[in-house]
Amino acid sequence: MEKTIEALNSKLDLLIAAVSRLAPPSVPETDIAIADCYVWAADPGFLEPIQRVNRVDIGLIKGVDRVRDILVDNTERFAGGLPANNVLLWGARGMGKSSLVKAAHATINASGKTVAPLKLIEIHREDIDTLPKLMNLLKAAPYRFILFCDDLSFDHDDTSYKSLKAALEGGVEGRPANVIFYATSNRRHLLPRDMIDNERSTAINPSEAVEEKVSLSDRFGLWLGFHKCSQDEYLDMVNGYASYHGLGSDPESLRAEALEWATTRGSRSGRVAWQFIQDLAGRLGKPLKD
């Protein structure tokens, strides 16, 4: 009899352990006061604090002075509780779109003009359909939030852009007053050109089909365009990085090496300038500043 009871208890323990493994993991409680930057973990649904943010000083972002000023002004108004627009930063790759968003956020918080720190939350492209869940989590918080999606675009068979449209400006409730959305993309309309052209050619009413596709971009009140830089702008970026990181070098030699580096890459951009600086610092045996 005792052996039977022990066997049953053993089986019950195994059953309880198996059921426990099937239960969903507990969701960590988010403390939005401990950091200024977070990454949205859509599954299971919490904000992961980021203590060391990968960003550069705003003064090192060259060749985009006009869009830089517009973005900082918009961000400053939002942080101060004033009306501000969602922003789409689009255009040439490697010209500092995502760097500018992170730098503008740091600049506003360092200015001392905000009552409470402005929070930056990165949401991954594949988690866009969870935006309503995230906004619902943030709307009652005593902070203001920039939701940031880097390299946002949609493929031919992707319909999650409709969720983004509704989250930004649609629905009965609308976007929470303490939330704004910034996105970067190489595409101005976030959708492939051939996708828009195909909709135009196959639809009963071509203009309505195109309107459906491009109306997503209309949810962004500000479109900030980034274009390929000139040789002088590229060299200005290189000189700025070299000076900031204390990479003393003969100006003519630095210029020649930077131009050769750009030629081998087949392009000039802020990213190419930064990659050259990393190579230069490595060859000189000097660490770069955090």
Image: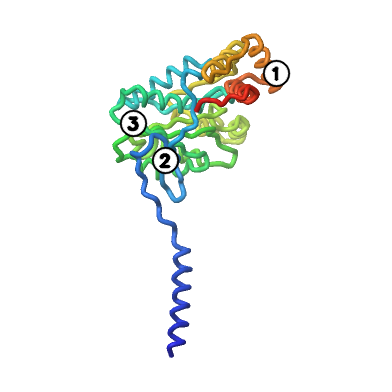
The residue wearing badge 2 is 49
User: Label 1 amino acid?
Assistant: Thr
Q: Nearer the viewer, residue 28 or 215?
A: 28
User: Label 2 amino acid?
Assistant: Pro
* Mark 2 burial class by Cα count in 10 Å: few <14, some 14-19, many 20+: some
Upstream in the sequence, badge 2 or badge 3? Answer: 2
The residue wearing badge 3 is 117
Which residue appears at 36% of the width and 31% of the height?
118
Q: Position of residue 77 (x, y in %)?
A: 34, 23
Numbered tag placed on residue 155 in the rendering? none
Numbered tag placed on residue 263 in the rendering? 1
Residue furthest right in the image: 264
Is residue 36 left or right of 115 when viewed as pictured? right
Element type at mark 2: strand
Marks 3,1: beta carbons within 8 A: no
Report how far apart the C-alphas of labels 2 and 3 lie in the structure. Answer: 14 Å
Query: Considering only vertical position in the picture, is 3 above or below 224?
Result: below
Query: Considering only vertical position in the picture, is 39 above or below 273?
Result: below
- The mark tally for this picture is 3
Residue furthest top in the image: 252
Q: Position of residue 27 (x, y in %)?
A: 40, 52
Marks 1,2: beta carbons within 8 A: no
Upstream in the sequence, badge 3 or badge 1? Answer: 3
Q: What is the quadrant of residue 259 in the picture?
A: top right
